[in-house]
Image: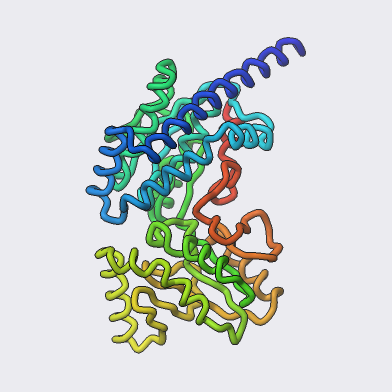
Amino acid sequence: MSCFIIFVKNQLLMIVSEKIIILSSLQKKLTDYIENGTSEKLNDAISNSIQHNKWFTQDFVIKAIRSISYLLSAENLNKWKQSQGQIKSANVNKIAVIMAGNIPLVGFHDFLCVYITGNMFIGKLSTQDKFLLPFIAQEIINIAPEEKKYFEFAETRLPEFDAIIATGSNNSARYFEHYFNRYPHIIRKSRSSIAVLTGNESKEELNLLMDDIFLYFGLGCRNVSKIYVPRNYDFTPLIKAMDGYKDILWNHNKYMNNYEYYKTIFLLNQIPFTDIGYSILQENSAISSPISVLHYEFYDDRTWLNEEINKNREKIQCVVAKEFNLNDTVVSFGKSQKPELWDYADGVNTIQFLNDMP
């Protein structure tokens, strides 16, 4: 029996190693496509994405693809495999994945987890982001045609499946919990991210923080929607750093429409705020903020701050900070929208979930 178990484990490791080779080849192709513009099909997928979702811009879509390309290096994939222990399900299951469409390729990590564990991916894409992931799946098939059996995209109703991963709004999540309760599942709700500042941040660190706040126009769950600052904090360096995104924000109609809308609402309701000219700073205890609005709250000591963050843990995706010991959700400036392979959404280990499938 022990020899059989060793044989099975070796077979599983071989399958993962083969997929890492395929994914590493994909990384090289994506890098070449982005750097040299050599793929008409990728150009079409980007163009179609921008036309169908006005929040997607060419620069932001390319940034998303670059981030994915970085993740798919052999070094990163092998590091992920080693940190995870077992990274292959004992059986092949059909895993349905219902994806959000708030930022480009937001569901890629779920897609990758299902694929690398040897399960069959059944994707239900958001209408807001339905061109990029099928392109990536097809590129994998082009590299290794035998992998085609692992990918299916559902246009309407989901076909038969064994487990489901679903991401959506809080309202959608309630529906998912009810409808998919009888299946093994991961249900993800809306979350936001925060930053903790001390007032001692360098100009470079504040510039990096602007990516955490404004990349993808702040629409991602890993985008910073609120900052905690010490009392008597000087906002001047922060506001100067914001100017790095000024042109991008000014030149985007949907973003500026939101900015004008919320500024008008605050004025009409006599709600205090600081107008940056393209963004709004507002003192507010809420973690999540509207598009174009950055909430802030003062803190007097770290004990209160730790308690406040722990109290809101179910609403927070990650914490951007320096020299702040909280837990593994803390990331450095500029890294909130650049998660590593082992940074799992909501702290739920997707690989472990898939490995535990019967």
On screen, residue 349 above or below 24? below
| Image quarter of the C terminus | top right
Q: Is residue 103 left or right of 127 when viewed as pictured?
A: right
Give the residue furthest to the left: 51
Residue 249 at least partly seen: yes
Q: Is residue 314 left or right of 128 when viewed as pictured?
A: right
Location of residue 304 (image quadrant) = bottom right
- Residue visible at 48% across and 65% down? 210
| Image quarter of the N terminus | top right
Give the residue furthest to the front: 36
* Residue 177 image point, x, y percent: 45, 46
Location of residue 255 (image quadrant) = bottom left
Give the residue furthest to the right: 2
- Residue visible at 30% across and 42% down? 46
What's the coloring here? rainbow
On screen, residue 267 above or below 36? below
Q: How many marks?
A: 0
On screen, residue 77 above or below 53? above
* Residue 254 image point, x, y percent: 26, 63
Residue 178 at least partly seen: no
* Residue 213 image point, x, y percent: 46, 64
- Residue visible at 49% across and 54% down? 337
* Residue 101 image point, x, y percent: 35, 48
- Residue visible at 48% across and 49% down? 188
